[in-house]
Image (cartoon, grey):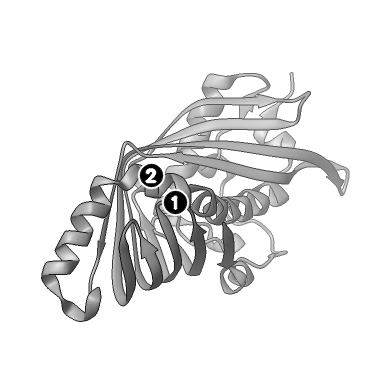
Amino acid sequence: MKVRVYLVVFLQFLGYSCGVLSFKISDVFPVCKKNDDQCLTAAIEKALHYLCENGLPELKLPKLDPIAIPEISIGTKGSAADISQKYIDVKLHGFKKASVSNAHLDWEKKKLTFTVFAPQLDQVSSYDFNGRILIFPIRGQGKAVLSQSNVTVYHTIQFDTVKKQDKDYFKVVSYVISTNPSKTSFKVDNLFNGNEALSERVHEVVNDNWKVLWDEAKADVDLTYAKVYETFAQKLFGKLPISDLVIQA
C-alpha cells in the first residue's frame, strides 16, 4: 500500500500559539493522582467531549466533531482492491457520543493507552476513484459517505518529557491507533456515469464484502487520523505542564 496524506493545510491551521492560556484547565482535563487509571479514563473522556463540542480556540484547535481534513489520498493494492482513492473536504462525525475506557499511563515505559468506543462514525467527503474493487472497474467523482457502527479505536501514545521554564511537559514521540468497526458501509454517487443499476449492484457487493476491503485500507486510514490526534495531543501537552495534569504524590 502507498498512502499520501495531505494534511499540510490542516496542520498549518493548527500552528503553534504562544499566547497566555485563557481557559480553565480543569474544564478540559481534570487533574488526577498518579497511577489512578479510573480518574485518567474519566479525564480523557471529559477532554474528548469538551474538544468535540468546543475545540480550543486559544490553541487554534478546531472542534473534534466533526474532524476536518482537507484531503486524503490512498493507493490500495491488494487482492480485493487495486484502486487510487482521493477524498476531498473530509468530515468525520460521531465522536461527541463516544466513551473512553481502560486508560493507563505507564510512567516507566512512557506510554499512554486508552480505548474509545463510538456507536456510529460517518465520514462524509467528495471522492475521486480510479481502479478496481473486487471484480468491478471503478472510476468516478462525486459525494461519498463511509459509515461505521460500534467502532472501537485503540490509542497508544509513546511520550517523552521535556523541561521548559523549570516545568516538565509531555512530548508525543509517536501516536498509533487501531480502528475496529463491527460493520462498515459505503455510499458513493455518480458511479459509472449515472448507471444506477450497475451502481446499485456494486454497492451491494462492496457492502457485503466490507470486511476484506476495510482490512486492506485500514492501515492507511489509521495513519491519517493518528496524525490528526497526534497534533491535538502535542498542542495540549505542549501547553499544559505535567504538574497541572497529574498529582505526583
Residue under the point 66% across and 19% down: 35
Q: Which mark is residue 71?
A: none
Q: Is residue 227 left or right of residue 73?
A: right
Circles 1 and 2: CB atoms closer than 8 Å: yes
| Residue 108 x, y percent position in the rendering | 78, 23
| Residue 20 x, y percent position in the rendering | 69, 60
Residue sticking out furthest to the left: 197
Residue under the point 63% across and 72% down: 12
SS of the residue under disc 1: loop
Per the model, the C-alpha gap separating discs 1 and 2 is: 9 Å
SS of the residue under disc 2: helix
Residue under the point 59% across and 61% down: 2
Judging by the rendered image, the residue that carries numbered circle 1 is 79
Depth order, front residue of 112/52: 112
Residue under the point 72% across and 45% down: 172
Judging by the rendered image, the residue that carries numbered circle 2 is 212
User: Given the image, on which type of amino acid does mark 2 rest?
Assistant: Val
Vertical position of residue 37 compared to residue 67: above or below: above
Vertical position of residue 39 compared to residue 137: above or below: above
